[in-house]
Image (cartoon, rainbow, N blue to C red):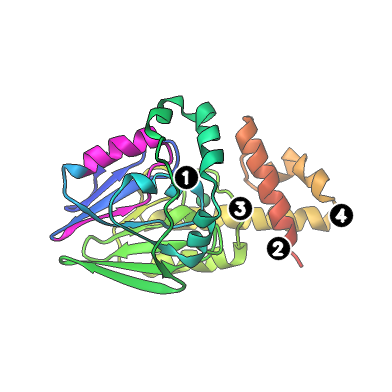
Amino acid sequence: MKQITDNVYVETGFRGANCSFVTTAEGIVMIESPQMPEEAVKWRDEIAKHGIVKYLINTEPHGDHFSGNCFFDGTVVGHEGTRQAILASNAEQFKERMKQMSPASLPFMDDFIFCAPTITLSERLTLCLGEHTFRLIHLPGHSPYQVAVYVPEEKVVFTSDNIVRAQPFLHQALPYEWLESLKKYQELDADFLVPGHGDVCDKSYIPEMSAAIQNWINAVEDAKKQGLTLEQAQSNTALLEKHGIKVGVDQRSQMSLRNSLAHLWEVVGR
Ligand SMILES: [Zn+2]
C-alpha cells in the first residue's frame, strides 16, 4: 500500500482492480473492494487501523471492482448500471470460480453475498464527509456506466478502467464516448490519477490512453476496409500489431482481444 497524499492510500498489488481509501475527519471513503475474499479480509484489517468506513464507491460494473463489497461496512455507492450488474451477479457461481482462482479465499466465503449500491447516480453525485468532497462524475467509455471519483481537496482522481496502465478491455466499450471522457479527466485540477489497474500516474498519461483507444478504432476500420470478416480479423495478429495493439500470448489476453474485437465490430464504422 502507498500513501500518495495526506489522506489517500492506494493498493495496486491486489489480483483485480486497484483499491483505495481516503481518510477524512468523519471516517473513511473506500474506492473499490478487492475481488479475492482473502485479500478483502486483509484490506479490511489494514483500513481498520485508519478509522471506520462510511462509504464504499464502486466505479464500474465489473466484478474485479465490487466482489469484495460484503466484507466492509459503509454505504455502497455507484452508478445505477453498476447496481444492476451487481444485482445480476451470482454468489454460487463466484464461489465455484474461487475454488480455481483463489482456494485461500474459501474459508472466508461462508456468508458471501454480492452487495449492490444503495445510493446510485445516473450523471453526477457529490458526497461530503468531514472536510472532503467526493465528486462522482459519469464518464462512459470502458463500459456505459463508468464513474470518475474526484477529490479536489487531495487533487486526486480515481479513474475506473477508463484509464489503465495495461491492455484495455473493450468488450463493453463505447469507444467514441471514451475518447470524449478522457478529455474530461484532463480538465480536472488533479495531481494524481489512480487508474483502474497499474501504477498511479498523472495527467501526462492521458494522451497515451487516448492513443490506445484510437488504435482499436483504427484497426477495426482498417479490417472492414480490407473486407475482412470478424473471424478473419480476430485471427489476424499482424493487423492488430500494425495498429500498435500488443497481442499477449496467454489465453486470457487472447480471449480479451477476441471479445474486444467482436464488440467493436458492432459499434465502429457503421
Ligand atoms: Zn472493467
Q: Position of residue 125 (x, y in %)?
A: 36, 72
Pointers 4 and 1 in contact (C-beta within 8 Å): no
Mark 3 or 4, closer to the camera? 3
Query: For mark 1, what is the residue?
Result: 64
For disc 1, the neighbor class at 10 Å (few under 14, some 14 to 19, many from 20) is many
Query: For mark 3, what is the residue?
Result: 170
Query: For mark 4, what is the residue?
Result: 227
Residue at 36% across / 40% down in the picture? Answer: 12
Query: Seen in the image, is 92 located left or right of residue 201?
Result: right
Pointers 1 and 2 in contact (C-beta within 8 Å): no
Residue at 54% across / 62% down in the picture? Answer: 141
- Earlier-in-chain disc, 3 versus 1: 1
For disc 2, the neighbor class at 10 Å (few under 14, some 14 to 19, many from 20) is some
In the image, is the residue at mark 1 within 8 Å of ligand 1 by its beta carbon?
yes
- Earlier-in-chain disc, 3 versus 4: 3
Q: Position of residue 85 (x, y in %)?
A: 53, 57
In the image, is the residue at mark 3 within 8 Å of ligand 1 by its beta carbon?
no
- Direction right: furthest residue: 227
* Element marked by disc 3: loop
